[in-house]
Image (spheres, grey):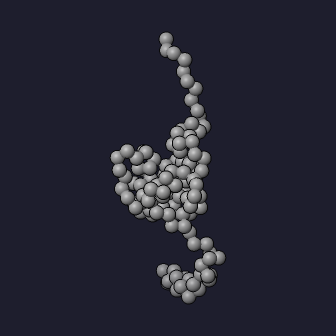
Amino acid sequence: MSGPRRPTDPSGLERYYVLTGGRSGPGGSSSSLDVATLITSRAAAVPGLQHEHEEILRRCRDPLSVAELGAHLGLPFNILAVLLADLLDAGRVEARHPIPASGAGRGPDLALLEEVLSGLERL
């Protein structure tokens, strides 16, 4: 007979606790991450990195939003934000925050939109 089985955690919370080292959210400047923030790798993966960190670096060779990255990795936003904070603090990734429409200073370029519409109508 086998010994008593340890109950498994169907929610995955135990795994997330291990992935983040018990941290529940990013700190410092990384706390401003948004689902639309673009992440780009600045360095290649090195031996000894956590598997999820390696995967983030590999997938973000081209810019990828936090939302897309979370979908690829199957991780909730808060867990991914902790992992990204580690990489941001180490200088291994770069985060480019979205420009809010109100901060752009003006609305869309109407002349450009009219040219695009004209081109589409010619198709």
Q: Residue at x 36, y 56 (%)?
A: 44
Residue shown at 48% from the left, 57% from the top: 89
Please state which of residues 27 and 51 is positioned toward the viewer in this rendering. Answer: 27
Q: Give the farthest residue toward the right.
A: 102
Query: What percent of the width, then of the height, locates residue 99?
Result: 57, 72
Along the viewing direction, whichever of 37 and 25 lies nearer the viewer: 25
Give how far across and how far down residue 123 sits, in percent. Answer: 48, 80
Image-quadrant location for residue 6: top right
Q: Is residue 42 left or right of residue 107?
A: left
Q: In the image, what residue occupies the spot 60% across and 47% down?
A: 24
Near-viewer residue (114 or 10):
10
Position in image of residue 83 (x %, y %): 51, 51
**Image location of residue 27, percent across then percent down:** 58, 55
Tell me if residue 103 can be seen.
Answer: yes
Q: How many marks?
A: 0
Please name the residue shown 52% across and 47% down the image. Answer: 74
